[in-house]
Image (spheres, helix red, strand yellow):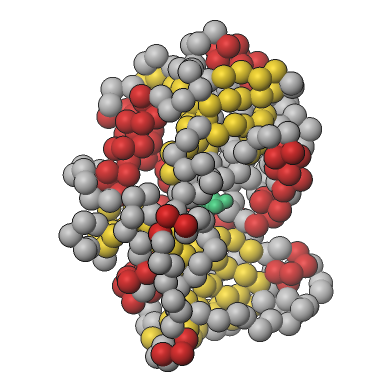
Amino acid sequence: MDIRVEPLPDDRKKAKVADETKLGFGRVFTDRMLLAEWKSGQGWVDARIEPYAPFVLDPACLVFHYSQEIFEGLKAYKWADGSIALFRPEMNARRFNLSAERLCMPDVPEDLFIGGIEELVRLEQDWIPTSDGTSLYIRPAMIAVEPVLGVKPSDHFYFYVILSPVGAYYAAGFNPVKILVEDKYVRAVPGGTGEAKTGGNYASSLKAGLEAKKKGYDQVLWLDGVHRRYIEEVGAMNMLFAYEDRIVTAPLTGSILNGVTRDSTLKLAAKLGMKIEERLIDINELMADVRSGKVKEAFGSGTAAVITPVGVLCYKDEVVQVGDGGVGLITQRLYDTLTGIQYGRIADEFGWVRKI
Ligand code: COI
């Protein structure tokens, strides 16, 4: 698909963050963005890369009222030799269209999704930070922009991509976080939108997140919405537990996100000789296994979170430390291997890296 590139006047160029250690996550945006429109009867039209700017939208647009919205998250890495790599963008493109299907939105063709990202990142490559642990976070999204108050799928959509140079997602960096197992609110139920990457899932998680923060926890771990018993995910990451010889994680039953980092981590762990168990994990069994030391390590996986060690779990007022509460050997090894491939320090035997 043809993507028009509009000029970037000098007065629209922003100053870059001088100290990359202060980037944080998702607060700074680059000079340009990609925007394409889908109109009923016409399909995708007018794909262009233009100076980054606010949208002017009618307050009646469907996205503002009924949350017809989806998004994705992936990263671009600058290698030591100056080349640029994306990590498994095909998985994001596929998941985006699964989310689109669930939310009654149009399919975005790969040449627009991946081709558009590649072109945009190429133009904005000077924005890719190079300090340890930094990257260029890529946020594709689609919103419903038909101005109408009846509840129905929109006849007009914006697909857009913005870029943000980022450091670690959690302020603590690669250090263990504290997780509260949520037993009051639920995130998803079978048949719901749990496996779609749609804003509503995140909006409905805010209250539990705030209550957890007040108690001193970084995030909540969701339980299944029916039995309130089986581990699901932590909103911004999937959860994995390392026993002596195996990694255990929740299965993809439709109510959790099929994480790109989750899938990559499982494949790396299998390659390191660990057994992989994707199965229902009863929270009571998990707490007993953490208490007894059978669970050696726990960590989350996500594009933003990368691999984040978990040092403490709390369920129904019982607080347990995972292992010695620090960063375990398996977590460290998986983190080093994954980021080694992403930053080009380790050969990619899986065909995950896409150079642009
Ligand atoms: C990502 O990891 O890319 C996500 O979309 C999670 C988001 C909550 C930051």
Q: In this picture, is 337 found above or below 304?
A: above
Q: What residue is shown at x 45% (from left), y 73% (from top)?
A: 30
Q: What residue is shown at x 52% (from left), y 72% (from top)?
A: 160
| Residue found at the far right of this picture | 149
Is residue 37 at all visible to an observer of this figure? yes
* Residue 255: quadrant of the picture: top right
Q: In this picture, is 161 found above or below 77?
A: below
Is residue 110 at all visible to an observer of this figure? no
Residue 174 in the image, given as x and y percentages of width and height: 44, 39
* Residue 155: quadrant of the picture: bottom right
Would you say 252 lies left or right of 272 here?
Answer: right
Q: In this picture, is 47 found above or below 98?
A: below
Residue 74 in the image, given as x and y percentages of width and height: 43, 56
Residue 353 in the image, given as x and y percentages of width and height: 27, 53
Please name whichever residue, 356 or 30, is drawn nearer the observer in this view of the structure.
30
* Residue 217: quadrant of the picture: top right
Quadrant including the N terminus: bottom left
Q: What residue is shown at x 42% (from left), y 55% (from top)?
A: 21
Please name whichever residue, 202 or 1, is drawn nearer the observer in this view of the structure.
202
Quadrant including the C terminus: bottom left
| Residue found at the far front of this picture | 19
